[in-house]
Image (tube, grey):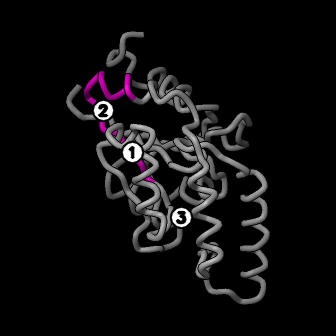
Amino acid sequence: MDKELKIAFDFDGVVASPILDGLLINLRIIKEHLMKSIGHRTDYFYPKSREERFVWTLLNKLRKPTCDLNCLRSLKSGGGIQTFLITSRFKFLEKDTIEWLKKYGSENLFDKIYINNTDISPVDFKVLTLNENLIDHYLDDDIEIIESINLKVKTKIYWRSNKKHHHSEIVSCKSICEFIEEIKKLEFSALWKL
């Protein structure tokens, strides 16, 4: 194989467990819609106050790995693959994100780690990062982001979910391991010994 395969993963809800995420995502969506309806200029929530940042930081520190990270370790050992972590976490969470990766021995599982240090819209950040790095396959758990980026990137997008998506081009995977198996089935079965 001439070209290295580029595979990327979202952090929250994909690599790190979604502690209370169902509830938090619904509350976030409601808050974002309310903010837009009263004329707030961004379409995403950015925690500005000390209290909001404290809560975000605390909840993010409570996360654990979503699955046995050996799937990623075995993926890296095969060669011919570059792995990326692409998280729209804002700049104030950068240090905590790196500490979390080190705590669980997963910082070396990724060739490149991208954190939203410019605090732009999560959608804009992911579109920009996926396109600049020519990512082949990307796994995310946030369906609103997936639907927003799907037509703006050449990357094959996967949804970490137990549900099927109504657009057939968005493949659902329950875990990182299932995502890797999907990629093996799609294009690179010769790269891995199945």
Q: Which residues are magenta?
A: 73-86
User: 21 and 161: which one is in front?
Assistant: 21
- Say which label, 2 or 3, has the lower sequence index: 2
Q: Residue furthest bottom?
A: 39
Query: Residue 62 location in percent, x, y?
Result: 61, 50
Which label sits in the foreground, 3 or 1?
A: 1
- Identified by mark 1, the residue type is Lys
Query: Residue tagged by mark 2?
Result: 81
- Image height check: is 104 above or below 77? below
Neighbor class of circle 1 (other Cα within 10 Å; few <14, some 14-19, many 20+) is few
Query: Is residue 20 found inside the magenta-colored segment of the image?
Result: no
Q: Residue at x 47, y 73 (%)?
A: 119
Front-lying residue, 170 or 18 = 18
Q: Amino acid at mark 2?
A: Ile
Residue linked to disc 1: 102
Can you identify the residue that label 3 sits on?
A: 123
Tag 3: residue type?
Val
Q: Residue at x 79, y 69 (%)?
A: 30
- Cα separation, mark 2 vs mark 3, equals 25 Å
The 10 Å Cα crowd at callout 2, few under 14, some 14 to 19, many 20 or more, is some
State which tag comes first along the sequence, 2 or 1. 2
Q: Position of residue 192 (x, y in %)?
A: 36, 16
